Image (tube, grey):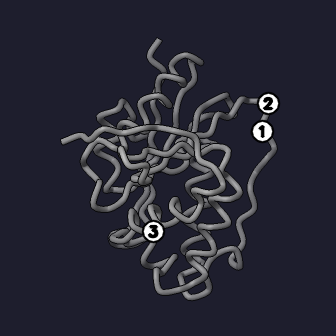
Amino acid sequence: MSIPLTLRRATSADIPDIVDVHLSAIADSPFEARCFPATDPATRNYYLAYITRNLHDITLACDAGGVVLGYVRWVKNPRKDFQDSRPEFRLDMYPSRGDQELAMRYLETAYENRMQSVGGESHCFLSMLMVKKEMQRKRVGAALLDPCLRQADDYGWPCFVNGSTKGRGLYEKLGFQVVGMSIFQEGICCYHMEREPKL
């Protein structure tokens, strides 16, 4: 069942609501529970900093009353902009009450697989797709992704996502294919997925 939605760009006033959506969306994620425990105040601070830093790439899905139900971080990576711009991965970047080693290894592996898949070429990257737990499976995620994928098709660029087990089905319905998988421990794996443009 789908509901009426409005898509709009995020503003700084939305940051607390976006973080609330994020924490709701990951409530049953084995990876997040292990590495970003909800009981650790550092987890919320980590995502506050992440959202603030990347606000310019975020689009929201809101209900008729303006309540934020989900968000997508969609990043356009022209070849000239992302070559030689490897991000930093350090243990102290992640909440100390979580498994910092696993967090770093997971995120670094996800990055390496994206670089291996896109081969240094222009692409669109689905960095985050988060929907409030109670609003999942109501087409909020698909509604957020639809304009992103149409944009990628207009550019003629492939898309890449590092998907969870929970998100894999949606991505496959939207044309993504698994090109690799990384298993870290029982219940924690990452599907590296790519979608070719529809020309």
**Left/right of residue 145 with respect to residue 152 in the rendered view:** left
Q: Which-is-in-front pick, marks 3 and 2?
A: 3
Residue 73 in view here: yes
Q: Which secondary structure, mark 3? A: helix
Circle on res. 80? 2
Q: Residues within 10 Å of mark 2 (few under 14, many from 20)?
A: few
Residue at label 3?
23
In the foreground, 184 or 38:
38
Q: Which secondary structure, mark 1? A: loop
Residue at left 34%, top 44%? 140
Residue furthest toward the left? 1
Q: Which secondary structure, mark 2? A: helix
Q: Which-is-in-front pick, marks 3 and 1?
A: 3
Q: Position of residue 190 (x, y in %)?
A: 43, 56
**Left/right of residue 172 with respect to residue 67 in the rendered view:** left
Q: Are marks 2 and 1 in contact (CB under 8 Å)?
A: yes
**Left/right of residue 4 with respect to residue 18 in the rendered view:** left
Q: Residues within 10 Å of mark 1 (few under 14, many from 20)?
A: few
Residue furthest toward the top? 199
Q: Quadrant of residue 88?
A: bottom right
Circle on res. 83? 1
Residue at left 63%, top 75%? 45
In the foreground, 13 or 36:
13
Residue at left 66%, top 55%? 12
Instruction: Tell me the distance, in whole angstroms, between the alpha carbons under discs 3 and 1.
Output: 32 Å
